[in-house]
């Protein structure tokens, strides 16, 4: 019970970090049985039309899948690209995410983000602005 409360508090701190998009909804958090000490966390991130996140990095690997709309994204060292629903990309832990924004000024966009790594290594470390 205490561990659950601690994890909930840590997640609340992580969601409060500035680079987050309009709305982050936690979908699943699970320990990885084949990788002790590591976990998987799935989030649904929704951008209102024209919304953008500040440049940031993550302390865990991230698989990103566009559920709806179109998202403009650029991870450091990779070209700027617009991803449509059904497309995806990978962000290695520590990589600088230079651009993350809704590519439309009139339609919302939603992405599924799946983080894999050490769970909440430090408060607010899910997304770090720099």
Image (tube, rainbow, N blue to C red):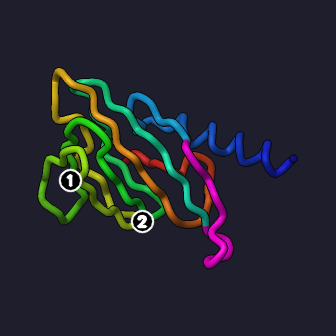
Q: Residue 95 is drawn in which quadrant? A: bottom left
Question: Which range is magenta?
Answer: 27-38
Q: Is residue 81 above or below residue 94?
A: above
Q: Nearer the viewer, residue 28 or 8?
A: 28
The numbered dot on residue 74 is 1
Within 10 Å of disc 1 (Cα), the crowding (few <14, some 14-19, many 20+) is many
Image x and y of residue 55, in percent: 31, 45
Residue drawn at x 27%, y 59% is 89
Residue drawn at x 54%, y 34% is 16
Q: Residue 52 is drawn in which quadrant? A: top left
Q: Nearer the viewer, residue 5 or 58?
A: 5
Q: Mark 2 vs mark 1: which is more N-terminal? A: 1
Which residue in the structure is indicated by mark 2? Answer: 93
Judged left or right of residue 50, residue 37 is: right
Alpha carbon separation for disc pair 2 and 1 = 15 Å
Which residue lies most toward the front here? 86
Q: Nearer the viewer, residue 67 or 105?
A: 67
Q: Is residue 17 above or below residue 106?
A: below
């Amino acid at each position: 019970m205490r561990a659950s409360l601690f994890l909930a508090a840590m997640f609340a701190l992580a969601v409060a970090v500035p680079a987050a998009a309009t709305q982050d909804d936690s979908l699943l958090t699970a320990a990885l049985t084949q990788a002790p000490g590591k976990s998987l966390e799935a989030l649904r991130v929704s951008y209102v039309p024209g919304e953008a996140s500040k440049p940031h990095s993550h302390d865990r690997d991230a698989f990103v899948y566009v559920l709806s709309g179109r998202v403009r994204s650029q991870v450091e060292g990779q070209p700027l690209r617009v991803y449509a629903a059904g497309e995806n990309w990978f962000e290695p832990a520590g990589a600088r995410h230079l651009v993350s924004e809704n590519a439309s000024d009139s339609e919302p966009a939603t992405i599924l983000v799946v983080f894999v790594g050490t769970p909440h290594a430090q408060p607010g470390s899910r997304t770090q602005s720099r």
